[in-house]
Image (spheres, helix red, strand yellow):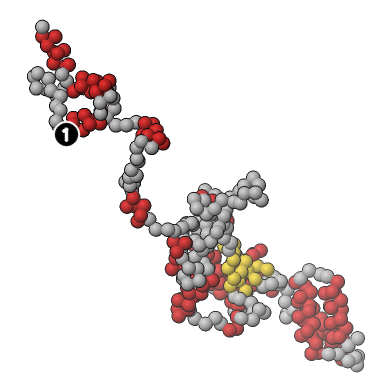
Amino acid sequence: MHRLRLISTRGKSTLAEKLKSAAGGADYGKSKQNFASGSITAKDERGADFRELYVMPKRKLRGQTQLEQATGRAEYKTRSRFDIADRLAERPPRSEEMDPEKQKWSDVWPAARTFASSVVPLPVRMGSRPNVEKRAPFKKEGNLELVKIPNFLHLTPAAIKMHCDAIKKFCTPYPPELLSKSTTLPIQVQYSTYIHQGTNIRDIRSRVVTMIVDVESLKLGDVAMEKFIRLAGDRFDEKSRELTIVTDRCHTRKQNLDYAYYLLTVLYHEANKVEQWAELKERSDNLKVEFEGSSTKTKLTELIEKAKTAGLATDEKSIDEFGKMWKEYRNTEETVETTREYGRQMRKLLGI
């Protein structure tokens, strides 16, 4: 009896009414509104909420809505997007609002930075295509190839001129005597900077520093110059009279440059230092053969005296020129030209 009473009770529920109205063609939407407003309540005999069976959805399916719109039985109301405020707040790219003729580019791109397509007002393209004639390379928007490589957009001529004018007040005038191309600088420093694409922007070859020193500008004496040349070894070039120091043992270029200056300073002070054993130096210990005090000068003087006695005309003033030529002839590699010059100076000295 209790089970039959439950069935009869549920037969009076709103679900049964919905089924009857659906079968009889009644207005389902009106009953739905009454149910939502609370005029129809779903309660059992104990006062608990009755959970109705899901027979029909409470909303129209997307296909049903599209079908009603297509047949004209329903009107679709457009709703605003949830991010409409953010979309309205978005500005167009800066490159579209920029006037290239009036805009000061150093304010837009003051320092080195990654490429930004929304800022650069240039139709830049980069990338590879199978057939470039049919399809142009990729545009700048979202182009990763432009982001990978370094750019020099901050080093425009106007920006460089502005920076030079700013630091000009801290600079001193360039020495006018060094403006001549024939002037040899006392010290020249050479190094190389390498730019390449890789996992590391640093190159081990960029730390190598080459220093070229004009030895004549050091104003060394004869003894100090000879000692300086001996200490320098094969780093000294006899023809150009230049000392070349190459440093690459330190990790950075700055450290190698400081080390090169240190070596030059040590060489200079060691060359000027006089030790007690240096006083024991003899003529045969010289680095080069000197004309002064040589047996050639002694014999040549005796020969000139004999020529005078014999009545031959001799040029004693040319003995200094002969001494310079003889020193060069003995301390350099013998060639045909130096041999001919030796014979010419000898005939001029003896008046032959």
Residue at (59% x, 71% y) in the render? 188
| Relative height, residue 75 to residue 15 (above, below) | below
Image quadrant in which you'd find residue 301: bottom right
Q: Which of 322 and 150 is in front in this view?
A: 150
The disc labelled 1 sits on which kind of residue? Ser
> Where residue 133 sits: x, y (%)?
66, 51
> Can you see residue 222?
no
**Quadrant in which the N terminus is drawn:** top left
Name the residue that disc number 1 marks: 37
| Relative height, residue 258 to residue 136 (above, below) | below
| Relative height, residue 72 to residue 86 (above, below) | above
> Can you see residue 314?
yes
Most distant residue in the top direction? 1
> Where residue 337 sits: x, y (%)?
84, 74
Image quadrant in which you'd find residue 19: top left
> Where residue 306 sits: x, y (%)?
87, 88
Q: Which of 336 and 130 is in front in this view?
A: 130
Q: Nearer the viewer, residue 250 or 144?
A: 144
Classify residue 234 as left or right of residue 67: right
Residue at (9% x, 18% y) in the render? 45
Residue at (34% x, 37% y) in the render? 74
**Quadrant in which the C terminus is drawn:** bottom right
Most distant residue in the left direction? 46
Residue at (55% x, 57% y) in the render? 124
